Amino acid sequence: MGDLKLCCLGLSHKTAPVSVREKFAFKGEGLEEALLKLNSMEGVDECMILSTCNRVEIYFTSRSANPFKDPISFLQEVKGATLDELNSFFYRKVDRDAVRHGFYVASSLDSLVVGEPQIVGQFKDAFFTAKELGTVGTVLCRFCETALKVSKRVRTETGISKNAVSISFAAVELAKKIFGDLRGTKVAIVGAGEMAELAVKHLITNGASDVFVVNRTLERARALAEEFGGKPYPLTELASVLKLSDIVISSTGAPGYVITKDLVEGALKSRGGRPIFLIDIAVPRDIEPEVDSLDGVYLYDIDDLQQVVEANIKERLREAEVAKEIIEDYVERFIKWMRELEIAPLIAELKQKAEEIRREVLEKRLHKLNLTPEQEAEVENITRIIINKLLHQPITSVKKKAVEESQNQVVQIFREIFGLGKE
């Protein structure tokens, strides 16, 4: 048997287009069947599969000299993987690299959007599925539990998940800065569009109360209003809606300005000094730029929001460097644990042999010394202390060497030195 290895075979948004990722994705019962099949292969001891929109990764342990042989055969059989696909899109990571990668993934450092929260739940689901099926054991259970612990520390001790990194979230972030508490704010959506609708949903989640849906046709306005639990208005009533609204998100795609300076100026007179936040997501723009010159008006277009997003992404990447330091400490601790786990039976064997020798010598000699029971007990204690002190240094050394060098070699030398039995 070779050294125990923890490995990762996978692809992600960084290495493969969506068409390839789709081909190799595992879902539902297919995932469970695949896990059981993979786990039955000779070169795989433990395994789990993480399958999301942006990655498919197999984490497994093996003692094989060629640990990736069986997982590759598995992908060829189950997914029809070609050698060209395996060589072009898949990465192979072993031990430290695999552990580090897994911790990065669980902490969202390897995500398409660094700091996104979904991956930790997906990682947890992958682990629980494998655990229920019995395809993970001591090593992968410890690996996954540590990865989830690392992820929690990264999120609580760094700002990696703070600050908006999407246009819709950036709009909400800016609204919070203007109004402080969004509870009770009134929101208007003018026109339609995925980003605008998403922004409205986020605003509602953050406490916005009333939603006014304005559209060229009342029928379309009604359909959207039903989705948001809001009130529909035709575009002809836009002036009235502006008077009521604290936040206005516009995305009509009209050729000219839909919200003019005069229109907003008229609305402000009825608002009693309350500010109005205008978000223009349309291209070409819906809101006349001169609106921004009015007191009590905050106007942001899609370029402004994009700048906020880009600044926030840079900040997250800076926080990612802090996260990497936290992760590196856990990587080293895990590798140390894994190596010590491997040599634990060897150390137990050495201690057992030393104890057998100690007992054998005492049984032969102790009765000749005519000692009192108290004296015999003291001899027992003294000999145990001597054995423990003698073994301390070699045990410490073998633990250290097992982390630094080839484990098989270390075990072989240790067995020869102490005359321990063969595996």
Image (spheres, rainbow, N blue to C red):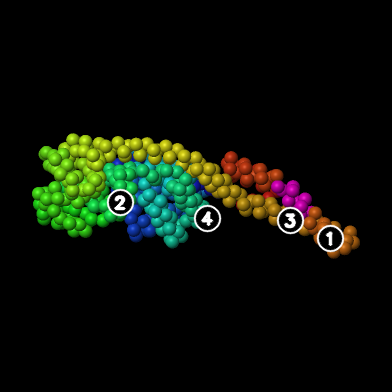
For the residues carrying marks 3 and 1, which lies nearer the camera in this image? 1
Q: Main secondary structure of the magenta part?
A: helix
Residue position marked by numbered label 1 in the rendering: 376
Q: Earlier in the sequence, mark 3 or mark 4?
A: 4
- Looking at the picture, which amino acid does disc 2 mark? Leu
Q: Which mark is residue 182?
A: 2
Labels 3 and 2: the sequence-earlier one:
2
* Secondary structure beneath label 2: loop
Mark nearer the viewer, 2 or 1: 2
Q: Nearer the viewer, residue 179 or 348?
A: 179
Q: Nearer the viewer, mark 3 or mark 4?
A: 4
Query: How far is mark 2 from mark 1, CA to CA?
Result: 79 Å
Q: Which mark is residue 355?
A: 3
Q: Are marks 1 and 4 in contact (CB under 8 Å)?
A: no
Q: Is residue 249 magenta?
A: no
Q: Which residues are magenta?
A: 383-392
Residue topped by disc 4: 138
First reached walking from the N terminus: tag 1 or tag 4: 4
For label 4, the SS is helix
Q: Position of residue 270 (x, y in %)?
A: 18, 48
Q: Are marks 4 and 2 in contact (CB under 8 Å)?
A: no
Q: Nearer the viewer, residue 343 or 122?
A: 122
Residue 290: mark: none
Dot 3 amino acid type: Glu
Q: Amino acid at mark 4?
A: Thr
Marks 4/2: CA–CA distance = 48 Å
Q: In 3D space, how far apart are the residues under numbered discs 3 and 2 (Cα atoms)?
A: 71 Å
**Residue 70: % across, % down:** 43, 49
Mark positioned earlier in the residue sequence (2 or 1): 2
